Amino acid sequence: PVSRGSKPACACPPGAPLTRCCTPVVPPQCRGCISRCPAVHLRSIRPSAASRRPGTSHAVPIGVPHCIPVCPSPCPHPSLTSPAPNSRLLIVSPTPPPGIPTTPPEDPDAPPGVLPRSPGCPLLCPLHPPLQNRVCLRLAPPRRVPHCLPPTPTPIPIPPASPSRYPAHPRAPPRCHPAGSPPPARRRRQAAMAKQYDVLFRLLLLGDSGVGKTCLLCRFTDSEFHPAHISTIGVDFKMKTIEVDGIKVRIQIWDTAGQERYQTITKQYYRRAQGIFLVYDISSERSYQHIVKWASDVDEYAPDGVQKILIGNKADEEHKSLPGSTGWTSMRPVPAAT
Ligand SMILES: Nc1nc2c(ncn2[C@@H]2O[C@H](COP(=O)(O)OP(=O)(O)OP(=O)(O)O)[C@@H](O)[C@H]2O)c(=O)[nH]1
């Protein structure tokens, strides 16, 4: 709209036709000044789709020339000058200059003069509150702010290693053997063992603690007797090779602990036994009665058909047995294990 008769804000001669930009930040000035101002362009409002709808209010009347303020750097227009000397921003238009993208895109249905808000734009001109809610046009990319780089670490010189007084010990080359075959040491050991026996039997000694299982084993393998009772811990084994009808038979005898606390361990060895000795002390009725329990464990954990032999040990202490008896073997029927 043109405001005739008001005091011009420029140095135009009096009486010149005045005009006021539709944007309130631009002060009244003559039409010639507006035309010369590089920051201001006169545009004609084109009716948008919204403006054609009946009852729609418009900030700017349709068809009235109005200016679109653009703030170049530096802005020649004092009212649009940004305080920042290198401000290359802004501003604002319902119809931005061609080739300049807008963010965010404008609403095509918005009435002219009512510009979409740009809530997240940090590049708003602080001097122009009416423009702060308008769309920003980024006219130039932001400058890169020079920043300092961390200093490049200087490599620390490593002094050359002083020569050792002792010459390096030459390492023996790795010994290799054909893939898939056992190493030579194990091959020699296997060959030597293969000659020592033809058959291997695994036997197991079971019975109460103190009945003499370890002593039986030592007597058989080493022809020794130890009068002291040293309880076996877990299991132990000894081997002896005998010849039967020209066949070398290796007997591997496993000595188990008779104490209750090791029975979880000893039961693991029942499975591989091919023969089992059930040992009791003929001077101990209790050890004889427990044979039933040992025989029951054998039935449960040993393989089916395993050979079982009942041994009444400590025959030299027969006199300690019940008066008039020759030991529990002669007095009682042999338990089911036999
Ligand atoms: N008099 C006599 N004593 C024996 C005989 N055999 C073993 N003993 C003694 O009985 C005690 C127990 O012998 P061990 O062989 O250690 O008994 P064990 O059954 O192996 O005992 P645990 O290892 O605890 O299961 C030892 O003091 C032996 O000297 C025997 O034939 N006659």
Image (tube, rainbow, N blue to C red):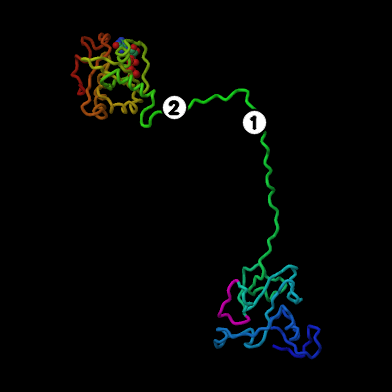
Residue type for callout 1? Ala
Q: Nearer the viewer, residue 123 or 270?
A: 123
Left or right: 329 in relation to 23: left
Query: Is residue 28 found inside the magenta-colored segment of the image?
Result: no
Label disc, if present, on residue 175 of the rendered structure: 2
Packing grade of label 2 (10 A; few <14, some 14-19, many >=20) is: few
Q: Nearer the viewer, residue 123 or 224?
A: 123
Q: Which residue is mark 1?
A: 161
**Separation of disc 1 and disc 2 at Cα?**
32 Å
Q: Is 17 rendered above or below residue 169?
A: below
Residue type for callout 2? Arg
Evaluate if marks 1 and 2 touch, with contact meaning CB atoms under 8 Å apart. no
Q: Position of residue 303 (x, y in %)?
A: 24, 29
Q: Position of residue 240 (x, y in %)?
A: 30, 16
Query: Is residue 111 found inside the magenta-colored segment of the image?
Result: yes
Q: Quadrant of the C terminus?
A: top left
Q: Nearer the viewer, residue 299 or 55?
A: 55
Q: Position of residue 56 (x, y in %)?
A: 57, 85
Q: Residue at x 23, y 10 (%)?
A: 323
Q: Quadrant of residue 201?
A: top left
Q: Position of residue 279 (x, y in %)?
A: 27, 18
Give the magenta-colored segment's residue range: 103-113
Q: Is 74 rendered above or below residue 239?
A: below
Q: Quadrant of residue 197?
A: top left
Q: Is 172 rendered above or below residue 44?
A: above
Q: Quadrant of residue 315?
A: top left
